[in-house]
Every structure is written in C-alpha cells, then in structure tokens.
Amino acid sequence: MADTGLVETLLRRVEKVDGGLDSQDVATSLGVDHQAIVGAVKSLLALGDVISADQRSSKHWELTGEGCEIAEQGSHEARVVSSIPEEGMPQSQLMKLAFGKVGFSKAMSNKWIRLDKGHEGGPRIFKTVEHLEDLVRDKLLLVQKGQASQLEEKEKNELKKRKLLSEVTVKSYWITKGSCFSTTITKQETELTPEMIASGSWKEKKFKPYNFEALGVAPDCGHLHPLMKVRTQFRQIFLEMGFTEMPTNNFIESSFWNFDSLFQPQQHPARDQHDTFFLSGEQLGVSVYKYDWKIEEAQKNILRTHTTAVSARMLYKLAQQEKFTPVKYFSIDRVFRNETLDATHLAEFHQIEGVVADYGLTLGDLMGILHQFFNKLGITKLRFKPAYNPYTEPSMEVFSYHEGLKKWVEVGNSGMFRPEMLLPMGLPEGVTVIAWGLSLERPTMIKYGINNIRELVGHKVNLQMVYDSPVCRLDS
Amino acid sequence: MPTVSVKRDLLFHALGRTYTDEEFDELCFEFGLELDEITSEKDIISREQGDTKAEGASDVILYKIDVPANRYDLLCLEGLVRGLQVFKQKMEAPRYRRVSPASSEPQRLVITEETTAVRPHAVAAVLRNITFTQERYDSFIELQEKLHQNVCRKRTLVAIGTHDLDTISGPFTYTAKPPGDIRFKPLNQAKEYTAQELMSLYKTDSHLRHYLHIIEDEAVYPVIYDSNGIVLSMPPIINGDHSKISLNTKNVFIECTATDLTKAKIVLDMMVTMFCEYCEEPFTVEEAEVVYPDGRTCQYPELAYRKETLSADFINRKVGISESTEHIAQLLTKMCLRSEVMSDGEQIEVEIPPTRSDVIHACDIMEDAAMAYGFNNIPRTTPRTYTIANQLPLNKLSELLRQDLAAAGFTEALTFALCSQEDIADKLLKNISETRACRISNPKTAEFQVARTTLLSGLLKTVAANRKMPLPLRLFEISDVVLKDESKDVGARNNRRLCAVYYNKSPGFEVIHGLMDRVMQLLEIKPGQGNGYHIQAADGCVSPVTICGEMDGLKDHRGMKRECRGVED
C-alpha cells in the first residue's frame, strides 16, 4: 500500500476536478516524485472502482547533465571568452580548463577569439569581442522553464546533437472518478486470520478479491523425463496384455546372437562397420555356441543393434526347457547404430519389442494382437504392407492413418520368425513365433510435439521441457 | 531398400492402363512396394544443383519405387511390369528357356588357374538378336548398376560385364595377370593404359574409385581376353572400349566374375531373364560354356526351375485363412510361382522360377500366398495363448525409485550410454585404465569412444547445458553403465546405477546426503556400520569442486549400486 497520506491527497484532488487530471501534473504541483503518484494510483485501482485511470504517454524535452551546467554557468564558448584577460592567454593554458577544448573551437567559429600562432612564448589567444550574446544558454534556460515549444525543431535537434538536450517519453495516468468514488478509503484484507475469526471482526472487514488472471506459485517438485513417462505407459500396456519383461540389461552382445542366430548371413550389409559399433580389445569371453562357418565373425562383440538379440537368447532358453510352454515377452531398452546423426536419428535409441511363441499361431493372430496393442495407444486404423526382413517371413510393416497428416504413416515392423532361426534353437516344429517392434522415441516425439530428437534425449535437452511436459495418456 | 526410378508414362504404357498417383500407390502397397516419390529429372537437378542447372532438363514424370532388398527381379521396369501384370492376372508368367546356338558351337569362356588367387568364379550367357531402343538400353545399363549395388555388394561378390558379341570372337579366356602386363583402351577413354596407370587414373573418378580397393593390393588382376587378345574387361573395375554395347548392338555377351558362385549365377539369371523378352525369340537365352581349370565344363545361365510341394493346410494354418487348395494354387500363380493342385487334392506343387531366388523355404511360399490373398483381407484374430505377466525385478525397482526420487524434488535426466573417453576419465580426474570401460573400435566421432562407466558425467553435462535455468538444479538418473566382466560370454555386463546431482550457489552437501538417506529409507536400509550404510571419504576424492561420497560395499540383494555425489558451483 502506498503512503496513505498521499493517497488521500490524490483523492481530494480528483474530487475537486470535474473531468480528470494527469498524474504527471499532480506530481509537479505536489512536488513529489511521479513514481509515488503512480504507486498511489495502482493501490487505489486494486481497491475496486474507486477511481479509473487510463495510461497515456507524452514526450517532452529535458536538459542533460551538461545542459544543466550550461544553463547555470553559460556555454563553454562564453566561458572561454570570459576567462581570457585583455592581454590574452597561452593556448596551452586555456586547454587545461575543463571547458577549454570544446569552448575554444566553438568560440573560434563564432569569431569571438583569435589565435596568434607566432606569438613569442607559444600560441596565444586573444578575445575579439567585449560583449556577447550566449544564445545556447538562453535556449537551454527556455527548456528548463518548460517553454521548449518556443524553440524551433532544428534548434532543439542541434542541441540534442551536442548532448545538451534529450527527448524523454513520460508515461502518466489520466485519473477520473470511478463508480464507487469516495475520499475515504478502507484498507482491504488479503488473508483471513485466526484472530479475525476469534474476535468476529471478519464480519466488518472488506477482503481483497483474488486475482484469477495471474498464475499461482509453482510447486517445488521433481519431474520425470517425458521419454521415460512414455516408456512407463508402454510397459503398462504390455503388462496389461500378459507379457513378461525380458532381461535386456546387456548392451554388449556377440555378433552371434545379434546377427547369426537371426539368419543374417555374414556378408549382410547390416554387419558392415558403417552400421554397427564394434568393441575393440581382446575377446574376453568365449562363445559357447559352435558356429562352424567363420566362428571369429560370430564372436565379434558389438553394441547390440536391436533387442531382438535378447529375444533370440530367450527363445533359445525356452527351447532348452524340458517341455515347451507358450510365452509372451516384451522389452523396451536401448539399441545402438553407427549412423549419421540428424533430426530423427541418434546413435542410440530405445526399441520396443513384443514376442509371442506358441503352437499354431497365425499371421491373423499377429495382426489381431497388433490391433489390440495399437488400440491401447489410441491408434485404431491399421493396415499392413508386405516387407522384407532377414529373420522374419512373412514380414509386415505396420501403418496407421494419421488424422493430422491425412495419410498412412509407418508405425512399426512385425513378422513371423523364420523356421531357419527357430529349429536350430531346438524349438518344437509347429511352434510359431510372432514378433513386432517400434522405436520409443518416435511415438514420444509425436505425443509431445517435438521435431528434433536432440531436443528430447541426451544432456543437451532443455530442462524446462522436462519440467513442463504433461502426464502421458497414450489413448487420449 | 533399393529404389528404382521409372518413367511414369512408360510404366503405364507397359501396364496397358493409366493409374492416378493414389491408385498406383495403393497397388504398390498391396504388392509390398512403396511409391516413395513422384518427381522428374528437372526436379532432381534443381533440388541438388539449383534451378539454373536444371534449365532444359527433362520434365518427364518419374516414379521412384522402393523395392524389398531381396527382390532382385523387381529392380527394373521390365521386371516390375512383369511382376505387376502377373499379379493382376493380365498375363501369365513367362517361361525362360536356355537354348543352344542354331548353327554353331556355344560361346566358350575358359577360366585359368591364375584367377584362383583373386576372383575365382565366372559365368556367361548370350542374348541373341536383341532389339534395343533408347529406353531399353538405359534400363539395361541401370539394372547392372542396381545389381552391382545390392546383391553384388558393391562389386565385391560379383561384377557384370556386357559386350557387343559381333566385335569380338571366342573362345574367351578369363585369367589373372600382374597389373603391369595388362594393357588396353578402357571404356570411354581415348588411349591405352596399363592396369597400373588405370588404378591411378580412377583414383579421382567419383564412381569407379569405390571399387579399386577390391583388387588394388592383389599381385595379379583379373582380366578377360578374346581369341585375338582383345581385352573385354578388367573386372571388377572397367570394361574395354572395344566391345562396348550400343543401341545398334544385336548380340550381347554377358559375363559375371565373382568371389561367390551362387551370387554370380543369380546375377546372370537376373540380367538375362529381365531382357530376353527383347530377343527375336522372346524369353530364350543362348547358352555359354564355362571351362574350369580342371577341365570340367558347365553350361550357363542355369535358369533352374525348382519344385516344392506343400499342403494347402500348411498355408491356411500359418496365415489364418481357410481357402480351397485350388484357390491357394491360383494365389501362388499370381506371384509368378506357377502352382498346381496334385492328385490328392490337398498338396500343391509349386514351381519356383529362376527370377525368385528369394524363395528358400516353405515359409517364403506361404508369404506369397498371404500377399496374393491380401494382408489386409486376413481376419484379425486374438491368440488364445494364456500367460501370466512378470516384470523384471530390476526394472520394477527402478520404476518405483524413479517415482520416489521425483517426489523428493529431483528431476529425471536421460543421458547417452556412449561418451568420450575423456568424459569418464580425464574430466573426472581418473585414469582410463581404472575404469573397466569397454572401448568401441570404429567410432565416427569422439562422442562414441566408450560405453559409460558412470552416470555422473552425463548428469554434469546436463547441468552444464542448463546453466541458464533457475537454481538450484536437482537431477537424477537411474540407468545402466557397462563394465568389463570376464565371467560373461561377451566379456562385459551392464550395471544398474542411481546417480543424483545437486547444483547451487552454495555446496549443500546435506541436500544430497539427505536424498541418499531417503533412498536408504525407501530400501529399508538403516544407517550404521555393519549391516547398515555409512559414508566414508573415498581415496582420490577428487577436486575441491567435487565432494564425493561414493558408497561401495553396500549389499543390496537386488544388485543395484548407488552413486551419490554432491557438486559445488
């Protein structure tokens, strides 16, 4: 609350005038700082409709510090003339004065002084006029008295160039009476206190209304990363569908499980240096599985390029059971590609994978299960395109209709594992394994409207994005 | 996935009807192709080199079609049209025949012993009385390039050479010689070069320089001569200029040299089956005889038709449909797999043509039946597989802790598992040899030198990138690091970690200490020596700016290890 005395003074002034008054004028006539009046206006506005105030702005001319000095003591050139005695003065001495340099050149151009370069003992200055009119000072005095309008624009601009004048914009309020105008004000309470309740004084008090336009105070809390929020939802969906989580906590994998076991020949392009990160150094482990065609190639350790390597390990484990039992597996974890990075590709990303193994599964079953899975993500329109994948046959790309883009977009890949992969593992004939995969980043980017993957993952993300990300409900 | 570019109007002419872009896209989708882009030469040049360069270029509409990587029979206009026409039942799949020359001995290609060391295999065939047009000729050249890039693995496995047979005379010799002894005028050059000179000439050739490494370091280079000593080609680099084919060429001699014989046979079959429709007697290919160093002879191209027998029941059961045997045989025939119902009414005899080298197992035939039926016509069913879901205990605990760490006011960071060696060693004042880090042998940049051994570096980098945010920053991450472990089959294992950082103007060690106490409380571990937890200063507690309270020796049955660090500004 501003100074109560000032507020009341202001109200009395408003009461006296018919139309309204300008806050700047009030400040001038009361001889107080304009900001104090602004404070009073704002606190009156907060009380309701006591007064109304419209903001307006006006421009006016003001003297600068140097301008003030001149208005008081005269222009530099006038002071130069008045400081030179009849017998003249050495130029070097004049230059030592604070106003010497500027004053000298101006006085020279006004022809108020002359310079005798050849004078004995160095250049000397003499005055050439006795009386002079200090026009600069006169003009500044006019501005100081608030009569700047008497000067021509050209004159004002010239003084502005000399940094003696400046044009300032003044914001002020035009104050008029409000519908509940009164010269006495009651202070409004902001909070209800226990004392008010105890004494019953709350009945008489006026309470300040809440400002619903402003934001509240942000709670002091931690936040989960949006990609991890989406991961939680995908885990939830798989668990709802009866899928068991696979142990994918092994980023480093042998080429055997990553490629050979998945029927990817050793000359397959995916095994190129260009696509896969190979581990250097001694081969510490010895692969237990004999692969009689270039075993060295199969033993090369790599950063896994897909989590399907883990699915293969799990299926092998399943095949070692005495009696086959049907399984549904899922995983969501990191995979690595030695790729060129851009707005949609990083060297590491998260792969989501689902696998079902049972007797007699059909391609129709795979499509049915995908339909249910994507339904839980809020995607209902699906269609399937034949595709090629070395370890699945048939292979299908999954497309969903994007309502925003008005076209079909690829949302995942799927297929039936080839018998060449399953039989050597020892799975019974007749057991079919269906599987599908997609990336975690892509649906997250769509969900949170992020176009560049680097704004979502990694240390360079803006934490504000993490703070601001909403909860993740994939089906809405 | 290879992309084939065809002229739209030419394609529609060959298909015998026009399509709207949407209709054609739909047809592609059904057939497992993807209409990737609709463009023109002019568009492509103006996009890549600017509008001025595109001036005067052709604005004939081009369809760029993505073809599955194993369908070499769809890599040119001829193959695409044949595949689609058979699929739409507008024509029957042609039958490719190998024929002997009418009035003479077959062309012979003699392989000498010397090739064993560098590129041991060769196959050959003749396209007799062929008629080229500009379009057919362009497609013929383009198919070679597509095959070179795909099944030939950039010419390492197979290289194709095509020659005007009327400019050369057999028998031909495939041999290998020291580079200094090979001398000829290569394709589109004005003078003769030795093989050595050629290798340095092509060092700067934007196209050919990619293939030089295949033979560069060999003692002898492969070369094919005719009976007069004229060089046909120096595979896998370049053909001779003498035998080059033109629009007027009538008889084409095709040779494929290889390090992989199976692939060479496939490539030769593709070349001849795709273009023999332009021969005077369509779909016939004249054989050539290959003589091996040991005197054995073989006739090529193989053009082998293989027969497989499977039951309609197998296909019905795998796909999830119940179609009659006759209908399934019809479906397969639409996919160029000519099929007949056998006498028992249940089995189907399927003939796999030489163009379909991708068909290796009954499941490949089943896929073709499903495609012909239409994936999107298959009823979607729910498997009755009954299973109980289980979470991985480690992930379950991680999920629970993440929630509680956020509830404790800490924000989750997500950092990379790969980083530079400097990040996990030098910058944390550690020696890389102490870290048990797994090193990557082929990183493209320093960002991917090692798998991280600590989460701390990622969190500190997150802080560094967010210095503009209001203080304090409270960050955590629960994720895996990778450590060398000789007891594992791959010599390394993941290790789940929790790391938290508090960043403010004052140290606030008590904040990070408090968080650790909270985590212990959540895990029901009490403070105290012995069975509980305690903090002790680590050796090499590293710099004045880092207070390090790493807690080793904490036994947790779930196998999680904690890192807990406070960082001062």
Image (cartoon, coloured by chain):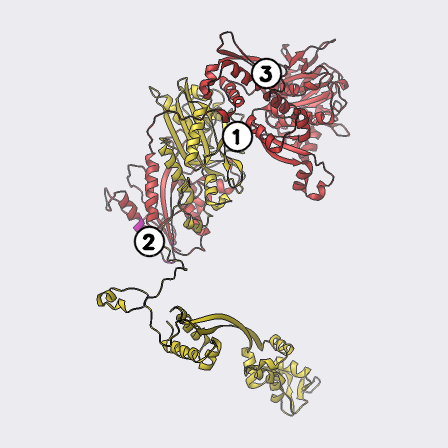
Chain colours: A yellow, B red
Assess disc 1: are there few (<14), some (14-19) or many (≥20) residues with their C-alpha within 10 Å of its C-alpha.
some
Gap between marks 3 and 1 measured at Cα: 28 Å
For disc 1, the marked residue is A270
Which quadrant holds residue A159?
bottom right
Q: Nearer the viewer, residue A86 or A31?
A: A31
The first of marks 2 and 3 along the sequence is 3
Residue B323 is left or right of residue B42, and the answer is: left
Q: Position of residue B545 (x, y in %)?
A: 39, 54
Is B87 situated above or below B2? above
Q: Residue at x 60, y 17 (%)?
A: B354
Residue type indicated by callout 1:
Ala
From the image, state whether disc 1 or disc 2 is nearer to you: 1
Which quadrant holds residue A48?
bottom left
Q: Residue at x 58, y 83 (%)?
A: A142
Q: Position of residue A96 (x, y in %)?
A: 59, 82
Residue B352 is left or right of residue B383, and the answer is: right
